[in-house]
Image (cartoon, helix red, strand yellow):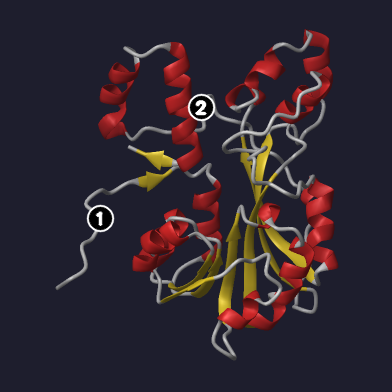
Amino acid sequence: MKPQRHKYEYKVSPNTAAAKVVRMVGAGRRVLELGPGPGAITRLLKDNACLITALEVDRKAIELVGQYCEQIHSCDLNDPEWPSRLPVGSQFNAIVAADVLEHLYDPWTTLRRLHALLDPEGFLVISLPHIAHGAIVASLLAEEFEYQPWGLLDKTHIRFFGLRNMQRLFNDAGFKIVEADFVVKAPEQTEFAKHWRRLPPETRQALSANPFRTVYQVVIRAVPLGAEGGSLQLTSLPVPSPTEASYSIGARGNRIAGFALSFLSLQTRQKILRLIERTGIRL
């Protein structure tokens, strides 16, 4: 019996970390994906003819993502023995950790262990949330640091990084950043919009002087320090302007979706649109 395939086709908005990760990995790679969850990125990598080995701790997620993987192993990346779950001599063209390192007690050691798993031309593709987003600064000014079910202050986050911290994270682990892309959101588009709106206008203006205030996530491609070529500094990169809404509804469903949303309360519409932002799904 042939395995049942999903019956729904959907696209990923280009301003999501998932889309940027898939672009950086490219097609036809042997990929190790750390913490794939239910497989949003894994499915797209498979569609790009990648062969994926995955390491995942959640049993329900393993059941979902397994259909996209050549191999999948159950393990906790906080366990120092996690590399032993892979077959001896395993090496990959690309290693992906999308919004994973912030959940680990020791992401520095985790990164160092990846050297042995890369083939000579291999690279990492990592996405990380940016703790210095303007909306977080606004929250701190309001004496708030409230964890959320998802987002920048996901309640399962253990580590937090600004751009310079991300740079040192890779350098200290023996890697250099060769490509990076920003996922941008205006403070008003985030889960902390209320704190931004409550700031006095002069305070918002002062915070707006920070060119990185709209950087929500950073997607990074890195190679070992000894690899040929130069590196880049995250703080030297230009930041694209956030669009009016970072979610995108496909042209085919735009009028229908807009019409349906118009019947919902403002609070419900905001919840739905934040969910669309989070998943990157285009209907």
Q: Please give left or right for residue 118 compared with residue 132 in the image.
A: left
- Image quadrant assignment for residue 189: top right
Q: Position of residue 193 (x, y in %)?
A: 64, 21
User: Residue 152: percent from the left, percent from the top?
Assistant: 66, 38
Q: Say which element carries label 1.
A: loop
Residue 233 can be seen, yes or no: no
Measuring 32% from the left and 46% from the top, which residue is drawn there?
Answer: 10
In-front residue for pair 274/171:
274
Mark 2 sits on what residue? 245
Q: CA gap, disc 2 to disc 1? A: 28 Å
Q: Identify the amino acid type marked 1.
A: His
- Extreme-left residue of the structure: 1
Residue depicted at 67% across the width and 37% down the height = 153
Crowd rating for badge 2 (residues with CA inside 10 Å; few <14, some 14–19, many 20+): few
For the point 70% across and 66% down, the residue is 222
- Asked if disc 2 and disc 1 are in contact, CB closer than 8 Å, the reply is no
Q: Which mark is residue 6?
A: 1
Q: Label 1: few (<14), some or many (≥20) within 10 Å?
A: few
Position of the N terminus, as image quadrant, is bottom left
Please tell me whether mark 2 sits on a helix, a strand or a loop: loop
- Which residue is found at the position 37% from the left and 59% from the top? 64
Give the number of the disc on residue 169: none
Picture coordinates of residue 24, whole percent (x, y): 56, 61
Residue 86 in percent (x, y) is at 56, 82
Specify the quadrant that holds the C terminus.
Answer: top left
